[in-house]
Amino acid sequence: MGKISPVSSKYIVHASIEIDGVVDKPDVIGAIFGQTEGLLGAELELRELQRSGRIGRIEVNIDTRTGKSKGTIVIPSSLDKAETSIIAAALEIIQRIGPCNAKLLIQNIEDVRVSKRSFVIERAKVLLRNMIESTPDSQELADEVAHSVRVMEIQEYGKDRLPSGPAINESDDVIVVEGRADVVNLLKHGFKNAVAMNGTSVPETMIELCQKKVVTLFVDGDRGGDLIIKELTGVADVDFVTRAPAGKEVEEITKKEIHKALRSRISGEQAKLELSKESDRINEVGLKQRQGFRPFRGPQRPPMQQQPPPRFQPRKVEMQGEERKVFKEMIESLIGTRAAQVLDNHLNILGRVPISELPSTLGNLGQDVYAIVFDGNADRDMVRAAEKAKVKYLVAMDSEIRPNETSVNVITVNGL
C-alpha cells in the first residue's frame, strides 16, 4: 500500500471519535475503509487513494476508560480542498465500530502550507535583520578605509626607529607622544606630524629632533605624564607642553579633546617651573612628617567631646492658611527630587529647576519671585541669592541659618 510523505501532504484531517465499548486500532481503521467503500465513487475510494499515495497513513490513537473508548484520527491528504473536504465529511457517517456504537466528528482540516508559509516568513525576517545589521553604511565604510590608511601611514623615524606620522620630516612643528598607540590615535584624527618616544627613556633621536623642530610634548593626564615631562625637559629643548584630560591617555581621547589640549599648551619652561614647585611642596610635606612637625596651637586644653554642628531653627513666621497649605504640598512633592520650584506672589509656579541652577535662575527672573520651595538645606549661598532677588519665603527641608542672619523668612518642614 502506498504511503504519502508528510513533506508532500497539503492538508491534514483531524477527527475525534467516541465509542461505547472497547475496540482496538485495527477495528477503527477497518470501519473507516469498510463503511466508506463505494460511497464516493471509484475516484474517491479510500483504498485506491491510499494505494496511489494521495491519502497517507491513517493514524488512530485510542484511550479506553471505564468500558468506553475515546481517541483521535489523523489523515494526511494531497488532494485539493474540495476532495479533502468530501473525504473528511464521509468519515462522519461511521456510526458503529464492530458491535459498538460510535460517534466520529471532524475537528478541523489543517492547511500544512499555512504553517510552512508562517515558518518561511519568520525565518525570512531573521535573515533580513541579520543582513541589515551586518551591512555597514557608507560612512562606516569610509571611516574604516580611512583608519586603515592612516594606520598604514605609520612610519619609522631616525636610527632609533621611532613610530611617527608621514609628515614628520616636512613639518616644522612636531607633536611628541609616549607610544605607538598615541601616534595611531593622532593619525586617526588627522595629525600626521606625531612621533613617539617609545617609553620614558629619551632616545638620542628625540634629542636631535628637539634641536631641529618646534616640539610640543603631549603626555597622558596621570603621574606617568609628569615623569615624561621631567625626563624630556631635563635633556632636550622642549618648546611647549600639554596634557590629556585628567585620568585619560592620549590614545583614547577624542578629536575635540586633542584640539582643546593643544590650544591650552604652555611653554616648556613654565612646565618645568610648575613641576619644580610641586616637587618642593611634596618634599616639604614629607620632611615635616619625618621630623614630627606639629604646628603651634597655644596652651593645651582638656579634650572636649565633639558635638555635631547645630541646626538653627528659623524664627516663627506668620503665614496665611492658603500659603501654608501650598508650601506643605509642594515640599512633600519635591522630596527626593533635588529640585526647586519658584513662585510668584499669587503662588503660581514660575518654573522648576535643579537646585544647582537656582542662583542663576533667580538672577534672570529679577524681583518677580515671591517664594522658593526646594528639596535641600538652606545654607548661606542659597539665602544670599534669595536676598538679592528680594524673596519673601524660602521653604527648605532644613536650615543652617540663624534667624537674625537674614531678612528672608526661612521655613523648614518642621515649621509647616
Image (spheres, grey):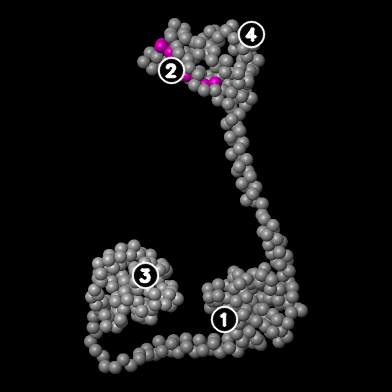
Q: CA distance from mark 1 to mark 2?
A: 89 Å
Residue to which mark 1 is pinned: 227
- Circles 4 and 2: CB atoms closer than 8 Å: no
Q: Position of residue 30 (x, y in %)?
A: 53, 10
Q: Which residues are magenta?
A: 13-23
The numbered disc on residue 392 is: none
Q: Is residue 329 visible?
A: yes
Give SS at disc 2.
strand
Q: How many marks?
A: 4
Residue topped by disc 3: 343
Closer to the chain start, of discs 2 and 3, is: 2
Disc 2 marks which residue?
70
What crowding class fits label 1: few (fewer than 14 Cα within 10 Å), some (14-19), or many (20 or more)?
some
Task: Confirm whether the magenta stretch covers residue 276.
Answer: no
Question: Which mark is first along the chain, 4 or 3?
Answer: 4
Hey, which quadrant is residue 68 in on the image?
A: top left
Element at badge 4? Answer: helix
Judging by the rendered image, the residue that carries numbered circle 4 is 42
